[in-house]
């Protein structure tokens, strides 16, 4: 049950100082992104209402169009406007792209040991693509949101880097030496974990419940299907060495595909579709890094 995951997180938080002051020291989400985040959670909002908001920010619009025109979406003839992009990939997908770009722009780029900005986002992108693919195969509505949830699941690590670059590096050194994950090592260097910090940011920025929960509970056991999808995607990318998440633990994942009511045939279908989609997702890394 989700309660189990919540209880595990509370146990970790019990003896830690409150990160609220630190969270409030970070920039607030841009007004346009904040509006988009709230609007896409409202079933009564129209595509035109969201477009009218997005078109106020030409830089953001340009980046969204660059992604929409990538081979990942393969819009026939390309899209010269957000309106055309919406016609082909849907306003939910366009909105989630805008939200992801806005959130990622809040953090500094970094390079600590072998844990680089590029390798970190390659891992995060992999989790996003795999999560979205799983949601599609399982026929879960709004699979685009799983892409965003997977992409942002580790954003708390970026916040910890901005909090203390030295502690961040020390944490990685210890994780590598002990062959641990960042999650296992961070408790010795920070008063709060990246899941807790990332969750508080997601709440502060009023991101959707799915994104909040994905960030908060991706390291905690849960029978909630949405959370398990993010966890399985994260474990798959770690096990296959896709990018780098600060994980130096070579243990195989604990969550099995049977736990998600997947057949072996469904799992193979997900893997095959993921490989095809991820090869087309290179543009995302360029836009994220710009």
Image (cartoon, grey):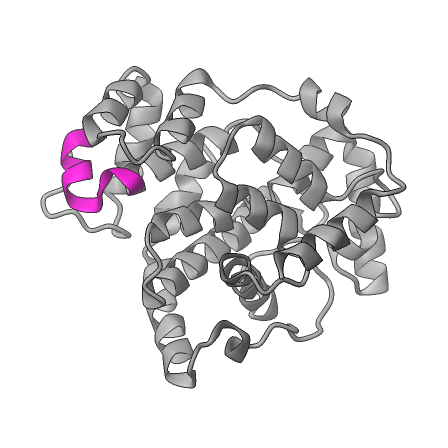
Q: Is residue 236 visible?
A: yes
Where is residue 263? Give x, y as percent: 42, 82
Question: Observer-nearest residue: 112 or 167?
Answer: 167
Quadrant (top left/top right/bottom left/bottom right) for the N terminus: bottom right
Residue drawn 24% across and 50% down?
Answer: 73
In the image, is 89 to the left or to the right of 231? Answer: left
Relative image position of residue 53 (x, y in whole percent): 29, 19
Observer-nearest of 17 and 114: 17
Q: Which residue: 35% across, 45% down?
A: 283
Q: Position of residue 70 (x, y in %)?
A: 26, 46
SS assignment for the magenta stretch, majority: helix
Quarter-wise, where is residue 61 in the image? top left
Q: How many marks?
A: 0
Q: Residue furthest left?
A: 77
Q: Is residue 44 left or right of residue 152?
A: left
48 within the magenta span: no
**In magenta segment, residue 89:** yes
| Residues in magenta, as a range | 80-92
Q: Is residue 158 visible?
A: no
Looking at the rendered image, the quarter that the C terminus falls into is top left
Q: Quadrant of residue 184?
A: bottom right
With respect to residue 121, does 159 lie above or below? above
Q: Is 95 left or right of 195, judged from the image as shown?
A: left
At a point 30% along the width and 42% down the height, the residue shown is: 93
Q: Is residue 89 above or below residue 245?
A: above
Residue drawn 47% across the image and 51% down it? 125
Residue 100 percent across, percent down from the top left: 44, 36
**Residue in the foreground of this view, choosing between 72 and 36:** 36
């Amino acid at each position: 049950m989700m309660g189990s995951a919540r209880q595990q997180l509370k146990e970790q938080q019990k003896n830690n100082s409150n990160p609220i002051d630190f969270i409030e020291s970070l920039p607030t989400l841009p007004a346009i992104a904040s509006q988009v985040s709230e609007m896409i959670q409202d079933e009564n909002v129209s595509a035109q209402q969201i477009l009218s908001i997005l078109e106020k920010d030409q830089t953001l619009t340009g980046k969204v169009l660059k992604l929409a025109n990538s081979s990942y979406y393969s819009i026939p003839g390309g899209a010269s406007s957000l309106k055309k992009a919406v016609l082909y990939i849907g306003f939910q997908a366009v909105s989630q792209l805008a939200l992801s770009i806005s959130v990622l722009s809040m953090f500094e780029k970094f390079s600590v040991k072998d844990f680089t900005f590029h390798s970190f986002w390659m891992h995060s992108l992999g989790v996003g693509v795999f999560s979205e693919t799983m949601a599609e195969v399982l026929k879960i509505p709004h699979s685009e949101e799983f892409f965003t949830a997977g992409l942002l699941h580790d954003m708390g690590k970026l916040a910890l880097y901005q909090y203390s670059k030295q502690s961040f590096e020390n944490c990685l050194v210890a994780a590598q030496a002990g062959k641990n994950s960042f999650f296992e090592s961070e408790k010795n260097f920070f008063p709060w974990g990246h899941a807790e910090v990332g969750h508080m940011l997601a709440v502060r920025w009023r991101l959707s419940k799915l994104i909040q929960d994905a960030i908060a509970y991706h390291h905690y056991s849960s029978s909630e299907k949405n959370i398990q999808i993010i966890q399985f995607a994260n474990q798959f990318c770690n096990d296959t060495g896709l990018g780098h998440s600060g994980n130096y633990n070579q243990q195989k994942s604990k969550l099995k595909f049977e736990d998600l009511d997947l057949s072996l045939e469904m799992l193979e279908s997900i893997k095959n579709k993921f490989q095809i989609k991820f090869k087309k997702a290179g543009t995302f890394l360029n836009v994220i890094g710009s």
